[in-house]
């Protein structure tokens, strides 16, 4: 993905956008090369986000916690002082939320096309014994 000449970026994925990525762990590893901070925001309970990221072996710098997306984006923007704050989402509501919280919005399809990320129709399916373990800490 091309950035505007700055690696001083905070990148937030909406959980549903992250679930549509074929290799979310690889996407996070790739994005770490051109971002300063990366994480996940969602309206879902904390354990849902944590469970998904653990199963996919994703190390995030921040997540929603018990807050909703709006409060999370506002808090992350205040905590991580970077040149850019980019929110990757999937809906018009995500776009509106980004605008209202002064984040740049990038639709998942556009982000995937720019960065060469593969998408799925939903959560990763099939046998993923290696990456989809419930017992992983």
Image (tube, rainbow, N blue to C red):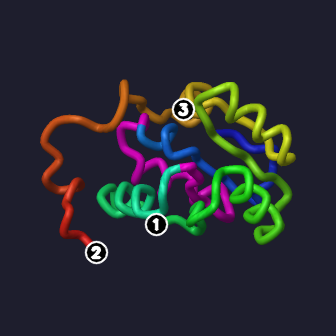
Residue that extends furthest to the bottom in the rendered view of this protein: 137
CA–CA distance between discs 3 and 2?
Answer: 29 Å
Which-is-in-front pick, marks 3 and 2? Answer: 2
Q: Earlier in the sequence, mark 2 or mark 1?
A: 1
The residue pinned by badge 2 equals 137
Q: Are marks 2 and 1 in contact (CB under 8 Å)?
A: no
Which-is-in-front pick, marks 1 and 3? Answer: 1
Q: Is residue 21 left or right of residue 34?
A: left
Image point (68%, 35%), residue name? 94
Q: Is residue 134 left or right of residue 31?
A: left
Start-end of magenta stretch: 20-43
Q: Residues within 10 Å of mark 1 (few under 14, many from 20)?
A: some
Numbered label tally = 3
Residue 74, x across and y down, in percent:
79, 58
Residue 110, x across and y down, in percent:
62, 26
Q: Residues within 10 Å of mark 3 (few under 14, many from 20)?
A: some
SS for callout 3? helix
Residue 101, x across and y down, in percent:
83, 47
The residue pinned by badge 3 equals 112
The residue pinned by badge 1 equals 59
Q: Residues within 10 Å of mark 2 (few under 14, many from 20)?
A: few
């Amino acid at each position: 993905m091309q950035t505007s000449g700055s690696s001083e970026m905070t990148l937030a994925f909406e959980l549903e956008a992250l679930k549509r990525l074929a290799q979310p762990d690889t996407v996070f590893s790739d994005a770490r090369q051109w971002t300063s901070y990366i994480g996940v925001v969602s309206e879902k309970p904390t354990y849902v986000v944590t469970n998904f990221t653990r199963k996919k072996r994703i190390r995030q710098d921040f997540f929603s916690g018990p807050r909703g997306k709006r409060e999370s984006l506002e808090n992350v923007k205040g905590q991580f002082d970077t040149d850019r704050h980019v929110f990757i989402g999937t809906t018009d509501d995500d776009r509106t939320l980004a605008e209202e919280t002064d984040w740049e919005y990038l639709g998942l399809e556009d982000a995937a096309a720019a960065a060469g990320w593969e998408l799925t129709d939903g959560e990763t399916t099939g046998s993923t014994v290696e990456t989809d373990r419930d017992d992983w800490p």
